[in-house]
Image: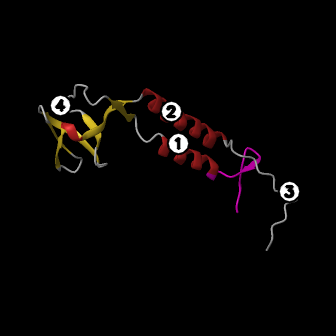
């Protein structure tokens, strides 16, 4: 395996990229779904994720709310109708300040690691590698 020299030190630059990719996966977006009571008032044009009593998960943007039926559209444009009594869990999409700050700081720290060549130092002196 090849190692690059940055600032006179040897390290694997792939570790920095691994942390960036892992952080991006864990902090995928600035939004998250917060659980809310099933009897809480719902907003039209809000984004929701529900789990029905038979275990089906549905993610949609609310279009209309009647006394007994929720109607919305999925990301692909499919219309969904769910009876209120069939809902077991309902979650509303909300902005997450923690995820936003975490994602921003991850990029800043990763940039500094890459720019300054800081990484995991590897000393290969005296290491014998089998053929």
Residue, disc 2: 102
Q: Which mark is residue 23?
A: 1
Q: Residue at x 48, y 46 (%)?
A: 25
Disc 3 to disc 2: CB gap under 8 Å: no
At label 2, counting other C-alpha atoms closer than 10 Å, the crowd grade (few under 14, some 14-19, many 20 or more) is some
Q: Is residue 75 left or right of residue 32?
A: left
At label 3, counting other C-alpha atoms closer than 10 Å, the crowd grade (few under 14, some 14-19, many 20 or more) is few
Q: Quadrant of the C terminus?
A: bottom right
Q: Nearer the viewer, mark 2 or mark 4?
A: 4
Q: Nearer the viewer, mark 1 or mark 4?
A: 4
The one nearer the camera, 95 or 79, is: 79
Q: Residue at x 88, y 59 (%)?
A: 126
Q: Nearer the viewer, mark 1 or mark 3?
A: 1
Residue 36: % across, % down:
32, 29
Residue, disc 4: 44
Q: Is residue 41 left or right of residue 10?
A: left
Q: Secondary structure at mark 4?
A: loop
Sequence-first disc among 3 and 2: 2
- How far apart are the alpha carbons under marks 1 and 4? 33 Å
Residue 6: % across, % down:
71, 47
- How far apart are the alpha carbons under marks 3 and 4? 65 Å
């Amino acid at each position: 395996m090849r190692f690059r020299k940055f600032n006179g030190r040897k390290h694997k630059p792939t570790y920095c990229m691994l942390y960036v990719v892992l952080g991006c996966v864990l902090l995928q977006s600035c939004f998250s779904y917060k659980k809310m009571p099933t009897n809480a008032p719902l907003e039209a044009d809000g984004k929701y994720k529900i789990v029905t009593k038979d275990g089906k998960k549905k993610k949609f943007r609310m279009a209309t709310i009647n006394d007994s039926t929720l109607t919305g559209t999925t990301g692909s444009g499919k219309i969904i109708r769910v009876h209120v009594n069939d809902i077991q869990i309902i979650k509303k999409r909300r902005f997450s300040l923690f995820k936003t700050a975490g994602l921003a700081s991850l990029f800043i720290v990763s940039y500094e690691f890459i720019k300054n060549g800081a990484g995991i130092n590897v000393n290969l002196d005296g290491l014998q590698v089998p053929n």
